[in-house]
Amino acid sequence: MNMKILLGLVALLNALAICTVLNLASGVFIPLVIAWFMLQVFRPIIDLGRKIKLPQFLNVLVVFVVFFSFCVVGIHFCVSQIAEFNRAFALYYSKLNTMTLDILKVLQIPPESIPRISWVDILGRYLRNISEVVFALSSKFVLTLVFLMFMLLEAPFLDSKIDRAFSGSNATKIKNILTSVSYQISRYLRTLALISFATGSCAWLALEILDVELAAGWGVLTFLLNFIPTVGSIIATIPPLLMAILQFSPGYVKPIMVLVSLSAIQITIGNVITPKVVGDRLGLSPVVILLSLLLWGTIWGIPGALLSVPIASIIKIVCENFPSLKPIAVMMGSGEETSPLAVSIDEPREGNS
């Protein structure tokens, strides 16, 4: 057998084995990876603490205070939105049943020919599924915080550990790669957060103007789903559209206006602003982004979908800095950049992770 074919098969088997291990050990790997990305999100606070010579334990404390403050605000908002949802569901429940019968009539399906639809039971099943997901994420949440705390405590000593572990040139190269990864991902996450905030705010404003129920909740949902590339923006449009159809039926003008408004926001920001701003930072091919979304979504589910683009970017940065792997980095690129990752190593440092 040709040696290149044999090596290719071995590489494929290794990749499958790694994916299997990542899937089976997701309970450990997902919190670890999320903690590292959270470290990049809070990097401006960490760097500010170092500049003003804040003691390390106080720096860690400030990060956790900021984080838990966001958590408290988020929990309070979720509780208020659940109360609003219960009110809206009770208000439109009879209307939902009427719409269901009308749809069956249009489709010429006798209502007695199908099992009786109980929206309360359907909603209950979905709520149970959501509660199970929330419980599973909560169990990972504690481990994520533990990983984050130790990463924050260990970060100041990382450079010295690399210097002791590797020779001079290799240590410098490893530190440059880690700094480049940290710099690129931190900048990407901050930029994507701002873009997602703009998208969610525009969606909330449009829905508020059109007087759609739960406008603030749909805006926050749009903000969160915008972190999932490609499909997130599509999914974010569906719930408020269904709410508008239910709320304004039998009228159709308002639902059409909701669909047009949200689509215009997603197309303008998602297809014009985001590729320009985020693409300049990562330089990833759209095909690579989609494949990464499918791969990591399959391995780790929703967390994998959220982390798919940053992980693909990390792989590209690492490949960019090794001559034997550079062709992979070129193929992963959009084709428009001029080796931005190599240039980024020479940019001002924000500190290693």
Image: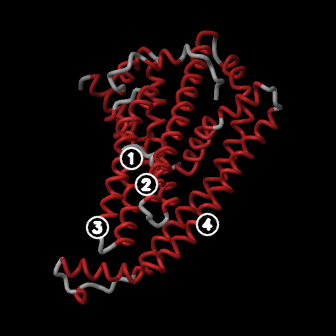
Q: SS of the residue at dot 1? A: helix
Q: SS of the residue at dot 2? A: helix
**Whole-number angstrom distance, CA of label 1 to CA of label 4:** 27 Å
Q: Residue 295 location in percent, x, y?
A: 38, 43
Q: Are marks 4 and 3 in contact (CB under 8 Å)?
A: no
Residue, x 36% and y 27% (percent of image)?
A: 332
Q: Earlier in the sequence, mark 4 or mark 2?
A: 4
Q: Quadrant of residue 245?
A: bottom left
Q: Quadrant of residue 347?
A: top right
Q: Are marks 2 and 1 in contact (CB under 8 Å)?
A: yes
Q: Quadrant location of the C terminus?
A: top right
Q: Are marks 2 and 3 in contact (CB under 8 Å)?
A: no
Label 2 crowd (10 A; few <14 / some 14-19 / many >=20): some
Q: Amino acid at mark 4?
A: Val
Please, which residue is most extreme toward the front here? 209
Label 4 crowd (10 A; few <14 / some 14-19 / many >=20): few
Left or right of 279, for residue 151: right
Q: Residue 121 location in percent, x, y?
A: 43, 80
Label 3 crowd (10 A; few <14 / some 14-19 / many >=20): few
Left or right of 110, for residue 122: right
Residue placed under numbered mark 3 in the picture: 252
Residue placed under numbered mark 4 in the picture: 79
| Numbered label attached to residue 265 | 1
**Whole-number angstrom distance, CA of label 4 to CA of label 2:** 23 Å
Residue placed under numbered mark 2 in the picture: 206
Q: Quadrant location of the N terminus?
A: top left
Q: Amino acid at mark 2?
A: Ala
Q: Residue 150 location in percent, x, y?
A: 72, 39
**Of tags 4 and 2, which is closer to the observer?**
2
Q: Earlier in the sequence, mark 2 or mark 1?
A: 2
Q: SS of the residue at dot 4? A: helix
